[in-house]
Amino acid sequence: MARNGMVIELDRCQGCRACMEACKVENNTPQGNFWMYVFRLEEGEYPDTKVRFLPRPCMHCDNPPCVTVCPVQARFKNENGAVVVDWDKCIGCHYCVVACPYGVNYFNWKDPEKAYYLDWKDKDLVAATGGAIPPYQNPDLMGRYGPQQRRVAGGGHLKGVVEKCSFCVQRVEQNLPPACVEVCPVQALHFGDLDDPNSDVSKTLSRKRSFRLKEELNTQPKVFYVGQSPPGARAREIEAVKAKQ
Amino acid sequence: MATQTMVRSAPPTGLRFYAWVGILGLLALQGLYSFVVLTTEGFYVTNLTDQVPWGLSLSGYVFFIGASAGATVIGLLIHVFDRKDYAQLGTRAILVALLSLAAAVLFIATSVGSIARSLLLPWFWNNPTSIFTYTSTTYYVLGALLLVQLYFTLKVNRRTASASEAQLARWLAIGTGIFAIVVIPTLSGALFAVVKARDFWNNPALAPHFAVVAVVTGLAMMMLVPIVAAATRRELVSQNTLSHMGLLLAFFVVVAGFFDFFDLLVFTYSDKLAGNEAWHFLSSAHLPLSAVHVVGYVVGFGILVSGLRRSTPWLAVAAIAIILAVASYRYNLTTVGVSMPLYPFIEHEHYVPSLIEFSVAIGIVALVLLLYSIAIKVVPLEGEAIAPKS
């Protein structure tokens, strides 16, 4: 039993958003759903301004409010400490969305066929891709995971269901790091067992002072930030990526 | 004790009634059509977002669940406080409570991604740490209690109830009233109050506030019932009884106003994000509804404590003003709570319901009004209504 977590080195992050792209490609998330999101923030007043970045995956809290409030136990912590959603149980009541202080949940507003960047039934696209499997039918995501064999990886991206970052359960099961960690060009993201003193995350945490988002709420996030202080009260978001399905 | 007046005339029939029922039927049908569009197309046809996932539907739900609980106060007045002059409202109060509960459940059902699973909620999947589990389960219990109470009360009305059945109807009214007023709105308030992520809701006074507002809503709606009945030449209660109900309503409006003031103190003096943000919302985009909230209470209270409460039309104005105030409060509470940004550095998101959302909401309200209009015509609502005391 691991207690997987993530450490993000803010002083390394360049805000390239490659992690967002990798997450989208790996998990085939629909338009508007960003399981990994990178805030680009501006601080100070012109001309004395500086830009900084804050990657925001799901915090996979040790004391997750979304699990507490979910009326149907569709939310649960898996054997590796990741907080995941059972697609077959979620009723789409949004209670997890309002209870989460981090804004990491995304509701599927449309049918999967209509929610993607491309129309995968378009004849030209079918011809161009040679009849490739549409992203919402990716067989790699259709499996069942963990001792309870629940459908948690995002296969299908069903309409009317809330979804979020799963720490890439389908990759972790094969001893691979989440896609965002693997793709980061400056290795700002670290992933591993927080209870293992020899893991990459534990070593990084022991070297640098860290903070977690909204610690005062006692959600005990398993995503730690090092290398910079938290964003100031006067920070503002720039270049926001906003899209609705 | 006020004198009790009962005029048992024939139920309203004729062109006006059928026109009224026809209009309500059409409104309900357009709501059904919009609901079909919502479920087939997906919730993208609403103006809800991942930042503001609860909107008009949730506001409708909290309004009607409060109305359902509040309407049962009439049963308590009759059977606990021995106000026999309210007796002719007893069965109608059960009906209003039942239909309001149905409206609340419909509002919830039209706001979740999977209706079929959500309707099965209390019987199959339970999470003992989720307030939602308890609220939904108690709604089933309330519905069952109200149905049983209605059954025995109708037997009493028809004079076919035995003495023990009449006693049972009396005790059901008392038990249901206490359960409805104490448990239902407080749990609904807790649904919001336990959410630490939303500063605007995370307030221990929210649950008792909900209970008081529920009584205000129920009393205001039940005050309209005899006024509307009188307009169709059916006097259910005397003017004195209406005046008494008005004073009772005024008292609870004062208590609700106190809780509003307490809420203002909490978020004004809180050092959380909520303070400034809440003021920003309530005084800008939500200003019209904030105004309706305050002015509705003030106007209603003013009428109810003045000599105007002896005039039926003014009582109707007071009841409508208070109902609008409560509806505004419910809407502001729900939508401001979720509209406030989770991080200080992201922009506010202002939510305005889409036409589809309005259409579904109008459809639900029309449907319950339609059912009420038909029920008062076909169900024997008047009669003894009071069980003999043992």
Image: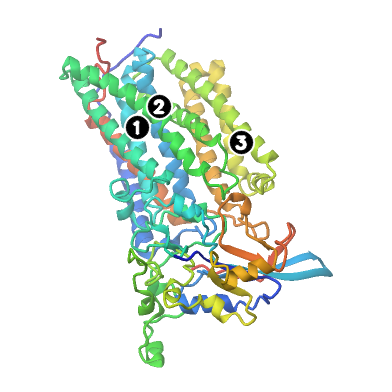
Which residue is found at the position 61% from the left and 38% from the top?
B291
Q: Chain of mark 2?
A: B
Q: Work out which residue is located at the far top of the displayed protein and give it.
A: B1
Residue B256 in the image: state x and y as whole percent: 55, 29
Q: Work out which residue is located at the far front of the displayed protein and give it.
A: A197
Residue A104 in the image: state x and y as whole percent: 53, 62
Same-chain status of marks 1 and 3: yes
Whether label 1 touches label 2, CB < 8 Å? yes
Q: Is residue B256 above or below residue A81?
A: above
Is B155 placed left or right of A112 in the picture?
left
Which residue is found at the position 58% from the left and 42% from the top?
B289
Q: How many marks?
A: 3
Report the front residue among A231 and B342.
Answer: A231
Disc 3 to disc 2, how far (Cα)?
A: 27 Å
Is A175 placed left or right of B5 in the picture?
right
Asked which secondary structure carries label 2, the reply is: helix
Q: Which residue is mark 2?
A: B222
Q: Which residue is mark 3?
A: B263
Asked which secondary structure carries label 3, the reply is: helix
Q: Is residue A183 above or below residue A145?
A: below
Residue B234 visible to an observer of this rendering: no
Of labels 1 and 3, earlier in sequence is 1
Whether label 3 touches label 2, CB < 8 Å? no
Residue B300 in the image: state x and y as whole percent: 54, 27
